[in-house]
Image: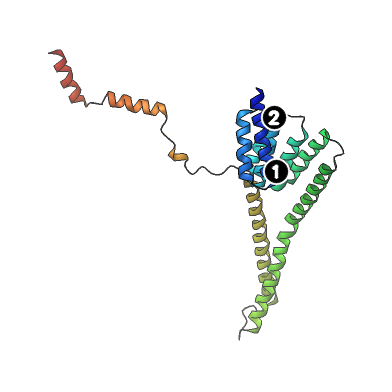
Amino acid sequence: MSTNLETEVQALKEQGNTCVREQKYEEAMYHYTRAIKIDPQNYSLYSNRSLVFLRMQQYHLSMEDAFMTIQLKPDWTKGYYRKAEIEFYTFRFSEAIQSYRKALELQPDDPSIIDAINRASRSLIQDRRADQQIPWLGAGVGIILGVIVVIADYVFTNKPTLSHPILMVLLTMAIAMIGFGVAKGFRYFVKCQRRSLLEPPVDLFENEKEESPSDSEKNSEKDKHPKYSKAQARERFKKGKS
């Protein structure tokens, strides 16, 4: 690369860094992207743009740049650290811990990486604890609602429907199980939403793609050679013989 291009890339990188400090992330992304077009092998540019996409919550784009950073410079700590940060903010705590540890292998005893590992470990413990506790919390709420229903049936009706204690217990247990199931389903929904954070957005215009050149050529060929019916073809053949 010529000196002029190197100077231009460095200037764009500095402009991007300034925009990041000023939290002008869209402008920073623009400068980094221009620099990458000039120097597509510059791994630090991908790392910086990955950070910008992370701040913009464009997680799938941020991960693509993190992978590109690692691919271009597999022995650079920051590539794995970027990947770990994306995984942490998309609630993939186990994967984040593994990526942080890979970064720590390349840069041992780094206090910021050690703190990040501890933070991710605490978040993983809390997340697993929530998986266990939230369904039972739903069951507890169900028990309270069941008791309220039984008391209301006994107090506010002239002839209580739930006159037998076994019916009261069964109703309370049924509502508790419903609460357990609803809470567990809600937790599953949250997990699915988290997994989708790294998926690219749905292409709403997939069925409206432009016609390919081959299709255009086929259509032009059809225009040049229009179809004839069998009767028209015989008539044209007779004229040709005469």
Looking at the rendering, in which quadrant would you find the C terminus? top left
What is the x, y in percent for residue 82? 72, 39
Which residue is outermost to the top?
241
Q: Amino acid at mark 2?
A: Gln
Establish if 30 lies above or below 238. Answer: below
What is the x, y in percent for residue 84? 74, 41
Looking at the rendering, in which quadrant would you find the N terminus? top right
Look at mark 2 in the image and give the residue it sits on.
71
Q: Amino acid at mark 1?
A: Ile
The residue at the point 20 percent across, 22 percent down is 233
The mark found on residue 170 in the picture is: none
Which residue is outermost to the right?
109
- SS of the residue at dot 1? helix
Based on the displayed image, in which of its 4 quarters is residue 182 positioned? bottom right
Residue in front for this viewpoint, 180 or 80 = 80
The residue at the point 66 percent across, 67 percent down is 174
What is the x, y in percent for residue 75? 77, 29
Look at mark 1 in the image and give the residue it sits on.
86
Q: CA distance from mark 1 to mark 2?
A: 17 Å
The residue at the point 70 percent across, 76 percent down is 165
Q: How many marks?
A: 2
Residue 125 in view of the camera:
yes
Image coloring type: rainbow
